């Protein structure tokens, strides 16, 4: 779940361990799950993309949200409930 994942995201990165940052990650991931409930919702590993987005955007919550949207929606086959893109790649390998 989002609440569990944000606390264990990149444990050695101190900037992500503040209450403010944990709250921002939770807000971003929850907002994305609401934005796209049918196709993706929330799935594990989105917390890592969220964390990196926050770090790249100097902890700006809105910019990090839109970066997460861009990455996830560009690679929707990986971040779909069926994980069809991932399954195709596994067959190729």
Image (cartoon, rainbow, N blue to C red):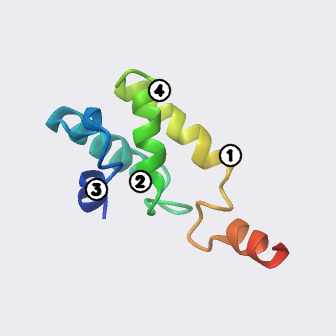
The tag on residue 56 is 4
Q: Nearer the viewer, mark 1 or mark 3?
A: 3
Q: Are marks 1 and 3 in contact (CB under 8 Å)?
A: no
Residue placed furthest toward the bottom: 91
Q: How many marks?
A: 4
| Quadrant containing the N terminus in the rendered view | bottom left
Answer with mark 1 or mark 2, whichever residue precedes in sequence.
2
Query: What x and y, as percent, mark residue 24?
Result: 28, 36
The tag on residue 50 is none
Residue located at (31% from left, 58% from top): 5
Cα gap from disc 4 to disc 2, whole angstroms: 21 Å
The tag on residue 8 is 3
Relative side of 4 to 43, left or right = left
The tag on residue 74 is 1
Residue located at (54% from left, 41% from top): 69
Q: Are marks 1 and 2 in contact (CB under 8 Å)?
A: no
Looking at the rendered structure, the secondary structure element under dot 1 is: helix
Q: Are marks 3 and 4 in contact (CB under 8 Å)?
A: no
* Residue matched to label 2: 33
Answer with mark 4 or mark 1, whichever residue precedes in sequence.
4
Relative side of 25 to 92, left or right = left
CA neighbours of label 1 inside 10 A, class few (<14), some (14 to 19), many (20+): few
Cα gap from disc 4 to disc 1, whole angstroms: 19 Å
Residue located at (18% from left, 32% from top): 20
Above-or-below relation of 47 to 79: above
């Amino acid at each position: 779940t989002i609440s569990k994942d944000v606390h264990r995201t990149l444990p050695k990165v101190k900037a992500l361990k503040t209450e403010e940052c944990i709250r921002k990650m939770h807000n971003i991931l929850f907002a994305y799950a609401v934005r796209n409930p049918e196709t993706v919702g929330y799935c594990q590993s989105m917390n890592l993309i969220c964390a990196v987005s926050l770090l790249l955007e100097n902890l700006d919550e809105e910019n990090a949200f839109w970066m997460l949207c861009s990455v996830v929606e560009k690679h929707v086959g990986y971040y779909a409930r069926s994980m069809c893109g991932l399954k195709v790649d596994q067959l190729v390998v």
